[in-house]
Amino acid sequence: MTITQETYETSANYLKNLVPKEFQTVKFGIICGSGLGGLVDTIDQSTKVEFPYETIPGFVSSTVVGHAGKLVFGHLGESRKPTVFMCGRFHFYEGHNLQQCTLPVRVMKLLGVETLVVTNACGSLNPEHKVGDLMILNDHLSLPGLAGNNPLIGHNFDSFGPRFPPVSDTYTYNLRKIAFKAALEIGIKQDDIREGVYAFVAGPSYETRVEARYLASIGADVVGMSTVPEAIVARHCGIKVLGISLVTNAVVVARGKDAKKEVLVELGLSTEEDTEIDIEGYKANHEEVLETSALRAVDLQKLVKKFADLI
Ligand code: HPA
């Protein structure tokens, strides 16, 4: 399906016609990543309105376990801020193109969104970023984007933004400061909330060891398979973005055992022992990602709520 201006407008008008008056203009949006969709269970259930993705014109369906696949309107936090939530998102690795993956962001723009929080699960490359830590995105690195998979490739929708948008300030400084204040206010320890660089990879296979070392060596602290296309499209249309990562696993960066050394020792041809660690047991897996998300979801939910109250 080719996406046109009309596609975005049809989606937005469909939603505007169905939501109660109080959600006809929403200024705040949240994209909930792996296992973080539980945030909508903590909002006022009496005013909540839900739309499964497959019922919204122009939306594709999310296929990932742990991603519910619905757009929710509700009141968030003590300030009861009218908010639109994406529970579950579309990933490049599901086979959708990046225009399809990011369509909801432009729909949010048409609904009135001015500030977007994008959350994700990620693997850490930087040993200081421990499993369970939260990380506020300071910047991102997109190898798929640099290699030709940028969501803005193709027709430029001038009504949304310019052909060549700057992205050097993708993650708004002021929002990052508010996020840190919110984190400290709700009692997250200084060492458990970080700021850093998120590397976007296409997935769905996790990184090889040398890919992980490469990403770390060019400046990434964590790696994940989402967020960046949505953040770029949001910035293109003037939405301010806060990115929050939850570190769900440590990525294997060790070189791993050296088979040749081992064989030479076994055959008595060398005495030089292999000092590399056995990486078995350290491999990334989706269950671990979901488990850590579930354990830390409450803090992340509290943080987003407090942030909503402070902006
Ligand atoms: N790599 C890529 N994406 C991820 C990871 C990872 O280790 N963990 C969660 N999402």
Image (tube, grey):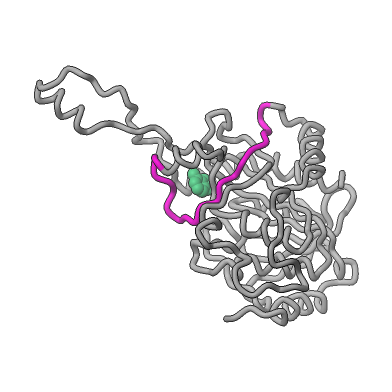
Count numbered badges in the picture.
Answer: 0
Relative depth, front residue between 43 and 85: 85
Residue 10, quarter of picture: bottom right
User: Does residue 151 appear anywhere in the picture?
Assistant: yes
Lateral position of residue 278 relative to residue 190, left or right: left
Query: x, y (%) of residue 284?
Result: 44, 43
From the viewer's perspective, is residue 220 above or below residue 165? above
Is 109 left or right of 288, judged from the image as shown?
A: right
Q: Is residue 199 magenta?
A: yes
Residue 311 coordinates in the image, percent (x, y) = 86, 47
- Residue 80 lies in the magenta-colored region: no
Front position in the image: 215 or 122: 215
Quadrant of the image occupied by residue 107: bottom right
**Percent x, y for residue 12?**
76, 75
| Vertical comparison of 254 with 248: above or below | above
Residue 100 appears in the figure: no
Residue 273 in which image quadrant? top left
Which residue is at 76% across, 46% downward? 304
Q: Quadrant of the N terminus?
A: bottom right
Residue at figure coordinates x 54%, y 45% from the top left: 223
The residue stretch that appears in magenta: 191-210
Whole-percent x and y of residue 6?
A: 72, 82
As drawn, which residue projects farthest toward the top?
A: 271
Residue at 39%, 44% (x, y): give it. Answer: 208
On the rendered structure, is 147 left or right of 154?
left
Q: Nearer the viewer, residue 169 or 97?
A: 169
